[in-house]
Structure formats: C-alpha cells, structure tokens
Image (cartoon, rainbow, N blue to C red):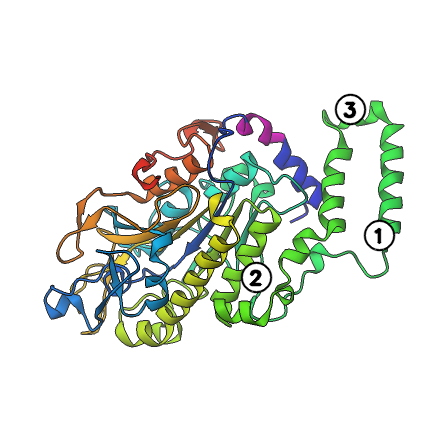
Amino acid sequence: MGLSLPDVLRMQAQAAPAARAEAKPNAKAKSVIMVFLQGGPSHIDIWDPKPEAPSNIRGEFKAIKTKVDGIQVSETMPMLANAMDKVTLIRSMSYTPVGLFNHTAAMYQMMTGWAPDKVSPSGQLEPPSPRDFPHMGCHIGRMLPPDGPMLPFVEMPRPLQESNVIGKGGAAGFLGKAHDPYRLYQDPNKDVRLEDLTMRPEVSNERMKDRFELLKGINGSMKDLEKAVSSYALNEYYEKAFDLVLSGKARDAFDLNKESEKMRERYGRHTFGQSMLMARRLIEAGTRFVQVNWPSVANGNPETDAWDTHAANFGPLKNLHCPKLDRALSGLIEDMDQRGLLKDTLVVVTGEFGRSPKLGVSTSGNVNSPDGRDHWPYCYTAVVAGAGTHRGYQYGASDAQASSPADKAVHPVDLVATIYHALGINPRMEVLNDLKQPRALVEGTPVQGLFA
C-alpha cells in the first residue's frame, strides 16, 4: 500500500520488455473485455435450451429462434437473440472438479489458468496470497502495456467474492502488487469519484509541470547518485505517472456523463449495465484488459440478483438476472461492433460453471429447492466475440440434456490460453514464480476453431 504510482509504473516496466518480445505483431486482439457472471449461471435456461428434454430438465422457459439459423436461446434473452450474428456460443465448456464444486476454486482456475492447490474441507480457499498464480489480466498488462497514459487492467465494480474470501485469483500474485488491477470499488450507475486520478484543486497544471521540470533538473545533476540508487532512469516512470494524472484520459474514460442518456439506457440503468458501458469507454481509451464482474457475490441471495440459484431458479432468472444480462450484453456487442471496436477487442462472457440439468438434485452437497439447480462444471456455455472469432457461430455442443459435451470439449484453461493466443502471447511461455521456478502462463491449448 506504500507504493506510489511512479513505483508501480517502474516495477511494471522492469518486467515488460522481455515479455513484450513474445507477443506476435500480427495478433488480431489488442484488448480484452472479460464479463464474469460469478455464481454459476444456468446454461440450460439461458444459452443452451433443450426443448425436447423432460420437464424436470428443460425447465419453465421456451426456446426462441435467433438471427442465426439453427441456433436457439432461451426466451429470457430476446435482445441477444437479435445480436447472435455477431458472437460465438461455446456450448461445450467442461471440467471435472477436484474436491468440492466450489465457487472460489472454479473462479481461481478461470482467472489464472491454474487449478488451486489448497482447498479446505469446507471447499473454501485460503485468502489471496503473494504466492498465488497471477490473474491473466495482470500478465497481459505487464507484457502489453498501454501505448499511452492509461491504466493497463481495470476490474469493476468490485473484486470477486465467495463468503469471506475476497479477490482470490484476481490479483497479480507472485508478479507483485505493482501489477494488480485498478479496482473501481464503486457503482458506475451512481456518481463516480476519482480523486486518485485527479490533481488536488490547489495544484494547477502549470504548477505540476513546474514541479516535474524541477525534478528532472535535480535528477539530471545527480547522475552518480542516480546510478548508485538504481540502474534505470527515474524520469521515465515519474513521467508516466505525471502523464496519467495530467492527461485526464483515464479520468475521462470513467465519466459516463459524457454518454447520451439514450446510450446509457441502451446498456441498462443498473450497476451491471453501466459497468459494461464503462468497459467500452476504457477500451476506447487504451486499457488492455477490463473485467466486469456480476455485481453480486457468488453465493448471494438469488432473489437479489445472485446467479447461485439453489433456492429459486426461474423467478430470479426471468425477473432480475436475464433482463439485465440480455440488455447489457447485447448493448455492448452491438455498440462495439458499430464503433469498429470488435475488430481488435476480444469479448469473453462466462461464469465459473453452469447449473445441474436436473432440477432439485444435489451435486455439490448443497440443499436445493424443487425448482433450484445446483453447481455443474461438467458442461456449460461461454460466449466470445470479436478479434477474428467467428460471427454467428456455435462451437461444440452439449448432449440432449446439457449434462456433458457431445463434441469439442473446452476446458477453462483452454479458454484462458485462447485469450493469450488472440493477443499474440504464447500461452506456454515461461514465467518465474515466487520461488524463481519456471512455470507456463497456462497449461491449456488455444481453441483455434473459434477463429474465422
């Protein structure tokens, strides 16, 4: 917490050059938006309906046609159905859990590309540790720093959480805190305060410039001391911090008042919708990786917006979750496509797992109501769009009951590897962990079939 902004930028830049050389210059993606629906959304009730399955599997919702012949979605997603020609559905996400079907363990795997090595008997993970594997956004921000004065990795509106474990798998881990994401910790649907990206009122731009010029003069006259203290030029890192604050670029990107009321309504006037709109603005401003987390904790109350629908599945999905998701996600896809941002931005939408095909059964040790669905990592759906991926496409398929992949299974670590691949980063390149041991970024394999 004692690190200043120049310290952070300096530490990021120290590790960046070697890693940057690994990136391929012809990569389609320049940035990523990760939309994480924590809690485990029900794939069969949203993306992968099974109208011919028995009633205790297909549930209450009907399937509807989309813009793409042969692809149906649930009636809860009518706006996305109209934007289906711009995305790919991966209907064969799958993994076999080690231990309990735990939210935090699954989220850690999805964020870092590595399975956690310590799970308590209750299924809870330990709190975040400096020895954790880094979130993929931390690696990406380090390897591909923004071209101008911009934040490399932003997470909003809050970190991932299950019970009292907050932010596991969502930080830089053994890379060091300098590579942690910038976390908003605010509701974008309300007035956002950005004091940390704003100069104090009593310090004018001119005074700030004078201070910086004075600092450069002092550093320039103290070459021997500078060399004794460090092997790099301090000016470069102070200049980046100076530019970040003085340019106002990051501050402006967070200012949704610059958007029309019509545009804000298109995304939805709620926390999730306005977070998605803010993600688009951050990408436009040059941020490499933006993660929008569903704004309710993994094991929260489904009647107040959590996807963890053990106690009630259909009412919350119909009245709360899906209307917000449908409007905000279709709004993001269509808006970014119209602005040309999908050409070089990869959008990934996923949860940590899906929900059990059969209603009222227990698969994770939890108690479920007759219309509730339990955790189900064996088969679920993710959505990708942009950066050269297919448009209007289905990759893989689930079986007749959406319980296991029938074709082209995709492990979560393969999806992480695909994100690196899209950015031109070799997912198997080696990095040194906290013990200076070589480790791959991720042991998954890029899913080449997602790209046109």
Give the side of residue 296 with respect to residue 311, left or right.
right
Question: 10 Å neighbourhood of mark 3: few (<14), some, or many (≥20)?
Answer: few
Residue type at the position of mark 3: Ala
The CA distance from mark 2 to mark 3 is: 39 Å
Mark 1 vs 3, N-terminal side: 1
Which residue, given by chain and number where applicable, does mark 2 sit on?
185
Q: Secondary structure at mark 1?
A: helix
Inspect the magenta stretch and tell me whether residue 301 lies in it: no
Give the side of residue 95 with respect to residue 283, left or right.
left
Q: Which mark is residue 264?
A: none
Q: Report the residue at 32% width, 38% height from top.
A: 447
Q: Which mark is residue 228?
A: 3
Q: Looking at the rendering, which quadrant does residue 71 occupy?
A: bottom left
Q: Locate the C terminus by quadrant.
A: top left
Q: Are marks 2 and 3 in contact (CB under 8 Å)?
A: no
Residue type at the position of mark 1: Asn
Question: 10 Å neighbourhood of mark 1: few (<14), some, or many (≥20)?
Answer: some
Q: Secondary structure at mark 3?
A: helix
Q: Report the residue at 32% width, 71% height from top.
A: 317
Mark 2 vs 1, N-terminal side: 2
Q: Which mark is residue 205?
A: 1
Front one among 279 and 430: 279
